[in-house]
Image (tube, grey):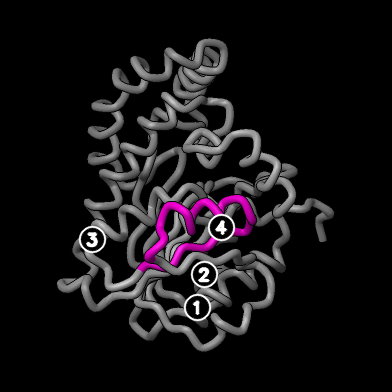
Amino acid sequence: MSDFDPKQYWETRLEDKWGIHGVGSLGLGRHYNKWLYSIRKRIFFRHLRSLFNDWSRIDVLDIGSGTGYYVDLWRSLGARSVTATDITAIASRKLREKFPDMECYQLDIGGNLPEKFVNKQYGVISAFDMLFHIVDDDRYQRALGNIFQMLRPGGFFIFSDHFIHGETIRAQHEVIRSISDIETVVKNTGFKVKLRTPMSVIMNNPFDSKNILLKITWRMTASLVRRLPRLGSPLGALLYPFELILISCLKEGPSTELMVCQK
């Protein structure tokens, strides 16, 4: 078991960098992250809007809500209710301030479920860009088990990860798991995979690519944005249309991908 403390890590990180640049790609700044999230928004509506004909009958649980970006997207679909959760006290508090009409809780999805969640059933549960931050494999499996328990039969579990085809890559605060490892846990938990589609091709770290040109291009982009954060806005605007085209054409991507599973 890892001695990494995810709660303390995220409390410190969000205290220092509250905003889209803190919950998103760290080091790339607010301006570039806005373009990354704009891409995610397009993908969200393209693939998830049609899951249900009538969203007014669907209750959604969002895990790792952070600043509430995806909470806003779920609400815009017309979901009957959206429950926001986060492992940190700071995000939970700010979520309650931002969404006073919603249920917002502090929740460690890799731990034991609090009593108030044990008998809850949701039509959709989402976990965007957060499961790879569960570095302990036992807690990762428990997280998926908890999600399965809270999902109603026929409901959808939606999450993003990197799904690399090589060996799993481990770092202190994240684990870039192989597609084989992820799908094994997903299927053993009881989920059926319905969709896997790219969320990024050229605008984020190409973990799952051996293309030297793509890797060099990414290093140059990241280096520029880190040294000159304000360049993130024009650079993101320049790359945005090419990213949309590539995402539309490719069935798999070298970076973050979206997976939709059904119970």
Q: In front of the other: label 1 or label 3?
A: 3
Which kind of residue does numbered mark 4 sit on?
A: Ser
Look at the numbered disc 4 and give the secondary structure of its residue: helix
What segment is highlighted magenta in the picture?
82-101
Using a 10 Å C-alpha cutoff, classify the residue at mark 1 as few (fewer than 14 neighbours), some (14 to 19) or many (20 or more).
Answer: many
The answer to which of marks 2 and 4 sits earlier in the sequence is 4
Quarter holding the C terminus is bottom left
Residue hosting label 2 = 186
Image coordinates of residue 95 in percent, x first then y, are 48, 55
Using a 10 Å C-alpha cutoff, classify the residue at mark 2 as few (fewer than 14 neighbours), some (14 to 19) or many (20 or more).
Answer: some
Distance Cα–Cα, label 1 vs label 3: 23 Å
Image coordinates of residue 112 in percent, x first then y, are 68, 77
Q: Hey, which quadrant is residue 40 in on the image?
A: top left
Residue hosting label 1 = 148
* Residue 92, numbered circle: 4
Residue hosting label 3 = 77
Which kind of residue does numbered mark 1 sit on?
A: Phe
* Residue 206 part of the magenta-drawn span: no
Closer to us: 263 or 214: 263
The answer to which of marks 1 and 4 sits earlier in the sequence is 4
Which kind of residue does numbered mark 3 sit on?
A: Leu
Residue 113 horizontal side relative to residue 49, left or right = right
* Residue 99 part of the magenta-drawn span: yes
Distance Cα–Cα, label 1 vs label 4: 23 Å
Look at the numbered disc 1 and give the secondary structure of its residue: helix
Which kind of residue does numbered mark 2 sit on?
A: Val
Closer to us: 174 or 84: 84
Q: In front of the other: label 2 or label 4?
A: 4
